[in-house]
Amino acid sequence: MLFSYNPEKTANSTEHGGVMRIKGIQIVPLFILVLVLACAGCLGTKVLPVNKTEPPSILVDYHRTGGIAGVNDRLVIFDNGVAAVSGRSTSTEISLNQTDIALISVLFNESQFSQLQANYPAPHESTGLMTYTISYLGKTVTAEDTDVPPSLVMVIEKLNQIIQSAGTQKSAYPTIGLTR
């Protein structure tokens, strides 16, 4: 018996003062048992290899602001097809398939995006103008409503289509089909 307690003996005697006593010979096996259990978790475990995958990189970063309604929308498309869409009060993620990603790349290539100037400011100030800032593969172009290069119009329309479609989707990762 590990613990000894005798209520009759302690009630009439001050020998142990009513305290339970652990027998000395039983404390050594108890200590060894605790030590073995503590060390058991440390033995024989293997370190699993860590999968070092690269995080997705940003393919397109599109920001449209301004207009009479005070629009402030942003679309970030990653090379793995995930797209983050945020507006004034909402934020969602959608999934584009590889066909959509390829179409976006074709649109940028056909617009000769890499050859465009960095800024296309409106010739006249106006409070109702939209400003579009588009980054693609490290190059950024900013254009305002009245001075958008014709080659960039189709790109802006498709990016706007993605933003609008994301607002009507109910699923966390819907697939948006882009048509040309």
Image (spheres, rainbow, N blue to C red):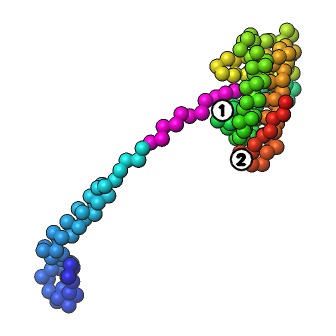
Q: Is residue 80 left or right of residue 39?
A: right
Asked if residue 62 is among those painted magenta in the image, a careful observer would answer yes
Q: Residue at x 20, y 87 (%)?
A: 6
The front one of 66 and 159 is: 159
Please say whether residue 85 is visible from this viewpoint: no
The answer to whether 114 is drawn above or below residue 103 in the figure is above
Identify the image quadrant of the N terminus: bottom left
On the image, numbered disc 2 is attached to which residue?
172
Magenta-highlighted residues: 50-63
Identify the image quadrant of the C terminus: top right
Secondary structure beneath dot 2 equals loop
CA neighbours of label 1 inside 10 A, class few (<14), some (14 to 19), many (20+): some
First reached walking from the N terminus: tag 1 or tag 2 = 1
Q: Amino acid at mark 1?
A: Phe
Q: Residue at x 37, y 47 (%)?
A: 47
- Of badges 1 and 2, nearer the viewer stands 1
Secondary structure beneath dot 1 equals strand
Location of residue 158 (image quadrant):
top right
Task: Give coordinates of residue 80: x percent, y percent.
Answer: 64, 35
